[in-house]
């Protein structure tokens, strides 16, 4: 699925614009604060209904306007296209996909497999476990059809168990929830383990190319002590969970441990090498998606020249071209981004929120 038409009104400093992006590479240039990142942010919002810069949607509305609108059209590659749009007005966000109101954001995310590569990509390595769980589950959501249902069932039971804990429910009722909780948790756990087995080989291919090493290790930590069953762990921690009012153990506490030669990547890799590692992780996800759908989805890359040196920029862009990804990449100047690997490309220049396609 690729974005073939985009309309934006009153979003950040973009008053109004209509674009027909390339299904391959889209280069976005302009001075700092011109609106390059705002354009990427609008595309991200169209695919996820959230910004990568703020949690407050009202901050996305252009100064002096009462709301914003983002409209797009997605190509399925079979000749059919799907309209998608969202409008923020009077404090409410309305989302429509293929002529129907969107009730669950998963419906939107399923249509637009979108990955971000921004200045804070290092949070995947340095941030808390939630960043790595989100990374792992993104791939599962788009590659493994059973995952969303399993994850939704687990989240529902997690909320019910937590509610029972907060009510200080009778221990016998908690024990019943423990068994249901364990069954749903193990389904999620197994899907993650199987997916990571596939992802690991793809990531090693990318790290060999970008970092010159195949010694990167990816280990899944389930969210409860190893060597102990989850049901046993829940029984042992029941009183503590009752005191806390929430479930301390389970897949919602899992982590993806990333190491090199059995050591933390922070102690071995430089800051620049860590950027290359995060790039390899994203490319590994893209490679798996490409094997399933013949497309690597959509990449939003903010200020590529500041993230990677020219050699590794070339390798990354060539890899994305080979994976048939649709890429939107920003830079101050056109010549700083390698484009030779792309047969299909468009160039857009941004000045003070005004976006113009260049020839």
Image: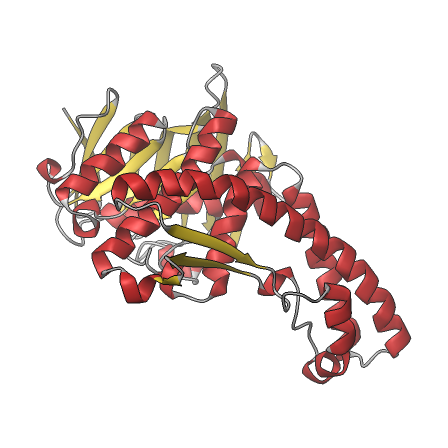
Q: Residue at x 64, y 67 (%)?
A: 224
Question: How far from the left and from the top, in percent, is residue 264?
Answer: 37, 64
Q: Is residue 261 left or right of residue 35?
A: right
Colouring of the image: secondary structure
Q: Residue at x 30, y 46 (%)?
A: 213
Query: Which residue is nearer to you in this view: 152 or 181?
Result: 181
Q: State whether residue 208 is above or below residue 159.
A: above
Residue furthest top in the image: 79
Query: Which residue is nearer to you in this view: 128 or 217?
Result: 217
Q: Residue at x 64, y 43 (%)?
A: 147
Q: Is residue 324 visible?
A: yes
Give the quarter of the image for residue 312. top left
Residue furthest front in the image: 261
Question: How far from the left and from the top, in percent, is residue 179?
Answer: 82, 62
Q: Is residue 224 left or right of residue 29?
A: right
Q: How many marks?
A: 0
Q: Quadrant of the C terminus?
A: top left
Q: Residue at x 22, y 27 (%)?
A: 346
Q: Is residue 11 visible?
A: no
Give the quarter of the image for residue 9. top left
Question: How far from the left and from the top, in percent, is residue 274?
Answer: 28, 56
Q: State whether residue 41 is above or below residue 233.
A: above
Question: How far from the left and from the top, in percent, is residue 258?
Answer: 42, 57
């Amino acid at each position: 699925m690729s974005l073939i038409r985009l309309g934006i009104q009153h979003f950040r400093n973009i008053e109004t614009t209509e674009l027909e992006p390339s299904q391959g590479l889209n280069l976005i240039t302009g001075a700092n604060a011109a609106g390059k990142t705002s354009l990427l942010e609008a595309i991200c919002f169209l695919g996820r209904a959230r910004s990568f810069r703020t949690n407050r949607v009202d901050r996305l509305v252009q100064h002096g306007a009462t709301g914003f609108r983002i409209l797009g059209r997605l190509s399925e590659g079979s000749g059919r296209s799907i309209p998608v749009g969202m409008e923020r007005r009077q404090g409410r966000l309305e989302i429509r996909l293929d002529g129907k109101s969107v009730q669950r954001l998963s419906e939107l995310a399923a249509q637009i497999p979108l990955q971000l590569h921004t200045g804070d990509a290092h949070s995947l390595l340095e941030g808390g476990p939630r960043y790595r769980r989100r990374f792992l589950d993104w791939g599962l959501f788009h590659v493994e059809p059973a995952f969303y249902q399993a994850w939704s069932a687990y989240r529902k039971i997690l909320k019910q168990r937590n509610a029972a804990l907060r009510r200080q429910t009778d221990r016998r009722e908690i024990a019943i929830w423990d068994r249901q909780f364990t069954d749903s948790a193990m389904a999620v756990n197994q899907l993650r383990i199987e997916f990571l087995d596939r992802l690991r080989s793809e990531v090693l291919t990318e790290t060999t190319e970008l970092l010159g090493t195949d010694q990167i290790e990816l280990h899944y930590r389930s969210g409860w002590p190893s060597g102990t069953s989850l049901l046993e762990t829940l029984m042992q921690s029941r009183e503590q969970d009752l005191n806390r009012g929430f479930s301390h153990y389970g897949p919602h506490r899992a982590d993806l441990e990333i190491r090199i030669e059995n050591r933390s990547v922070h102690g071995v890799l430089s800051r620049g090498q860590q950027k290359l590692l995060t790039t390899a992780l994203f490319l590994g996800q893209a490679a798996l998606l490409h094997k399933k759908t013949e497309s690597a989805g959509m990449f939003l890359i903010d200020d590529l020249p500041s993230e990677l040196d020219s050699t590794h920029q070339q390798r990354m862009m060539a890899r994305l071209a080979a994976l048939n990804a649709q890429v939107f990449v920003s830079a101050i100047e056109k010549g700083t981004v390698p484009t030779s690997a792309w047969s299909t490309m468009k160039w857009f220049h941004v000045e003070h929120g005004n976006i113009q396609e260049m020839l």
